[in-house]
Image (tube, helix red, strand yellow):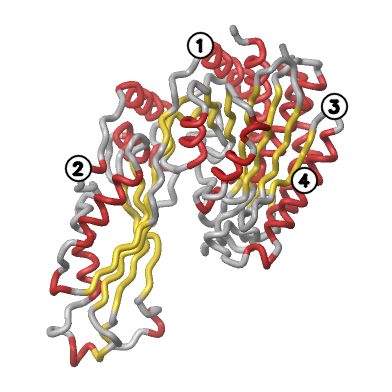
């Protein structure tokens, strides 16, 4: 088995000398995911990031005799990095990450920015370092750390996609394309998730599904002076607000459609309570509330369940409203809202889209023209029960790396790849973790990677991979 102190020494040096400087350069690349850069291929930023990752990996693959790396390119799709590292025996571990990024967002601290890498207080600021650029470097470093100590491990494959922030719509095609080369993994490690704090290893037990769509309400073919029209022509904004009230209680935020709820497993309720006990006030204090804004409840375990197992609606974008400084007294012809609906992990995404579309599309107030457009909907994921060897391994890995036992909690976000893998490889064990702890703010302004946590997660994953090889067969 690996020596914990030797693991720490090796991993710390790799992060300081190799990983952080590379991530520093990676953050400078505005390789936004295809949903946010329709001309991503023409701009070439994604190719620049892939080339950087490929070059770093090739420099280190010589430590693994027989290892191969290919950049897979299916026509019309984002590229995928596929690394195959031989191991001992016929078993297989899959390690997953992505290198595409969310868009810029406003609100960065003065002097900071999405493409401006800065290190302050052990935090590497900039878009994509924590979500999820570090994953490939961490994965290969964990394997190099085992190799340095001559600790055996199973064959490992590393998949780094470039479409995750757009819903991983290219990934299923690559999984099918590579099926014969992948084989059947018995353990999947994903480093694209969150952490309740920076004090211990956090295991993600579930991921919510997602339905994204738009609601458009049109009342006029062109804008009209509000003095002449208000009182006769209904407000498109008001009607949009009324339609949203069909699916969400505007007083409490509770989703009103019964079809969007599932029975929460008792084990997940117990884990939510335990997580709330560990986090205490940080359950809500981790968010940058403005002024005296308060959370949507006082029961901390209930808040954890709200963000992990209950449907929630967010309006994340809009059209039709004129910027305040330019707005005249005009009754606007339409209001268009982009809706993000988070779904319980075990709810079928297609079923949710059907229910929401039906509710919003029924006869509108004043017979306004309404258009509802949703994608297919993404089904979430609920982790299978941990095998005894893995539960014991995670306990040791967290204690060795962090000095505390692991914690277990669902995540409010979505990683479409996990549900797909669960279907394709029944019985596979999952380790879903990450470095996105309090205030790290993935997708928003001031995103950062907490460097000490990145080191500890890398060390923990090395321990888990070693234990996987030695587990009872």
In-front residue for pair 343/321:
343
Task: Say the numbered circle drawn on residue 308.
Answer: none
Residue 117's quadrant in the figure? bottom right
- Which badge, 1 or 3, comes first in the chain's sequence? 3
State which quarter of the image contains the C terminus.
top right
Spatial separation of the CA atoms under disc 2 and disc 3: 55 Å
Task: Say the numbered circle drawn on residue 258.
Answer: 2
Residue found 43% across the figure and 37% down from its top: 207
- Which badge, 2 or 3, comes first in the chain's sequence? 3
Tag 2 near tag 3, CB within 8 Å: no
Spatial separation of the CA atoms under disc 4 and disc 2: 47 Å
Camera-near label (1 vs 4) is 4
Residue 182's quadrant in the figure? top right
Dot 2, crowdedness within 10 Å: few (<14), some or many (≥20)?
few
Residue receiving disc 3: 65
| Label 4 element class | helix
State which quarter of the image contains the N terminus.
top right
The residue sitting at the top extreme is: 472
| Label 2 element class | helix
| Label 1 element class | helix
Residue receiving disc 4: 54
Rendering coords of residue 409 (x, y %): 43, 30
Tag 3 near tag 4, CB within 8 Å: no
Residue found 53% across the figure and 19% down from its top: 405
- Which badge, 1 or 2, comes first in the chain's sequence? 2
- Which badge, 4 or 2, comes first in the chain's sequence? 4
Tag 1 near tag 4, CB within 8 Å: no
Task: Say the numbered circle drawn on residue 388.
Answer: 1
Residue 368, compared with residue 192, is above or below; it is: below
In-front residue for pair 87/415:
87
Residue found 63% across the figure and 30% down from its top: 94
């Amino acid at each position: 088995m690996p020596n914990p102190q030797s693991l720490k020494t090796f991993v710390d040096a790799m992060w300081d000398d190799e990983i952080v400087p590379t991530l520093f350069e990676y953050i400078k690349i505005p390789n936004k995911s295809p949903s946010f850069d329709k001309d991503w291929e023409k701009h070439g930023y994604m190719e620049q990031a892939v080339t950087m990752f490929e070059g770093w990996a090739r420099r280190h693959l010589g430590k693994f005799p027989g290892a191969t790396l290919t950049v897979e390119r299916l026509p019309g799709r984002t590229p995928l990095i596929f690394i195959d590292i031989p191991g001992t025996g016929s078993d297989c571990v899959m390690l997953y990450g992505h290198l595409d990024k969310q868009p810029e967002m406003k609100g960065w601290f003065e002097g900071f920015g999405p493409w401006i890498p800065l290190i302050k207080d052990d935090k590497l600021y900039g878009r994509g370092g924590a979500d999820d650029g570090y994953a490939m470097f961490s994965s290969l470093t964990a394997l190099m750390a085992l190799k340095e100590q001559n600790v055996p491990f199973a064959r490992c494959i590393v998949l780094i996609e470039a479409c995750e922030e757009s819903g991983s719509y290219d990934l299923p095609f690559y999984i099918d394309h590579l099926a014969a080369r992948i084989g059947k993994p018995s353990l999947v490690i994903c480093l694209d998730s969150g952490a309740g704090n920076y004090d211990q290893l956090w295991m993600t037990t579930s991921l919510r599904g997602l339905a994204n769509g738009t609601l458009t309400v049109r009342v006029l073919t062109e804008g009209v002076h509000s003095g002449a029209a208000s009182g006769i022509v209904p407000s498109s904004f008001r009607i949009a607000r009324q339609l949203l009230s069909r699916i969400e209680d505007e007083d409490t935020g509770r989703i009103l459609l019964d079809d969007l709820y599932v029975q929460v497993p008792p084990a997940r309720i117990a884990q939510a309570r335990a997580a709330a006990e560990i986090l205490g006030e940080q359950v809500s204090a981790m968010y940058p509330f403005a002024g005296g804004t308060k959370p949507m409840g006082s029961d901390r375990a209930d808040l954890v369940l709200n963000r992990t197992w209950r449907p929630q609606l967010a309006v994340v974008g809009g059209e039709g409203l004129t910027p305040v400084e330019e707005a005249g007294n005009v009754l606007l012809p339409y209001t268009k809202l982009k809706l993000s609906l988070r779904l319980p992990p075990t709810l079928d995404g297609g079923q949710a889209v059907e229910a929401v579309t039906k509710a919003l599309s029924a006869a509108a107030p004043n017979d306004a023209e309404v258009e509802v457009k949703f994608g297919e909907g993404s089904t979430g994921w609920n982790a299978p029960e941990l095998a005894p060897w893995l539960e014991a391994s995670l306990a040791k890995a967290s204690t060795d790396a962090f000095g505390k036992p692991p914690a277990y909690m669902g995540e409010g976000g979505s990683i479409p790849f996990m549900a797909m893998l669960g279907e394709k490889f029944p019985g596979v064990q999952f380790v879903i973790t990450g470095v996105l702890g309090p205030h790290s703010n993935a997708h928003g302004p001031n995103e950062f990677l907490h460097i000490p946590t990145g080191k500890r997660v890398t060390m923990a994953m090395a321990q888990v991979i070693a234990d996987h090889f030695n587990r009872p067969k």
